[in-house]
Amino acid sequence: MPVSLTPGAIKAISKLMEAPDFDVTQRLRIGVKGGGCSGMTYVLGFDTPTEKDQSFDIEGIACIMEKAHEIYLLGMEVDWHDGLDNRGFTFSNPNASKTCGCGTSFAV
């Protein structure tokens, strides 16, 4: 498994997938894109698989990731926080040499 999801992240993602209008052909895309204050930004959302993707399953959640992104994300943990001052997904990436204050951007 290139990345892991905490129980909190699994619960939050599963809740999104249980919505009546959820497109069951979509998979959870985990990846990166250029940009952000530290150079790269995390991608987490539902998308259609392409030929560039590898597929894997985490606790019944079908996931996809571009094969080229694994070098940046191998060993990363995605968590969900539901506090008053911090609500949303967080990323703990052992490959990041620098991260921004908001936690959604990193450098390698």
Image (cartoon, rainbow, N blue to C red):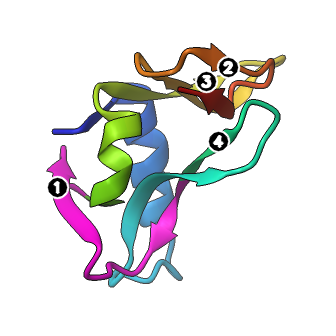
Label 2 element class: strand
Between residue 50 and residue 46, name the one nearer to us. Answer: 50
Amino acid carrying label 2: it is Thr
Residue at the spot 69% in from the left edge and 33% down from the top edge: 105
Q: Tell me, yes or no, whether the highlighted magenta stretch contains residue 49.
A: yes
Q: Quadrant of residue 42?
A: top right
Name the mark nearer the viewer: 3 or 2: 2
Amino acid carrying label 4: it is Met
Badge 3 density bin: few <14, some 14–19, many ≥20, Cα 10 Å: some
Between residue 28 and residue 71, name the one nearer to us. Answer: 71
Query: Marks 1 and 3: in contact by CB < 8 Å?
Result: no
Label 3 or label 4, whichever comes before in sequence order: 4
Q: Position of residue 20 (x, y in %)?
A: 49, 78
Label 1 or label 4, whichever comes before in sequence order: 4
Label 1 element class: strand
Name the mark nearer the viewer: 3 or 1: 1
Residue at the spot 20% in from the left edge and 63% down from the top edge: 54
Question: Which residues, given as a range, are shown in magenta?
Answer: 44-62
Q: Position of residue 49 (x, y in %)?
A: 32, 78
Q: Which residue is labeled 2 in the image? A: 99
Which label number is shown at residue 89? none
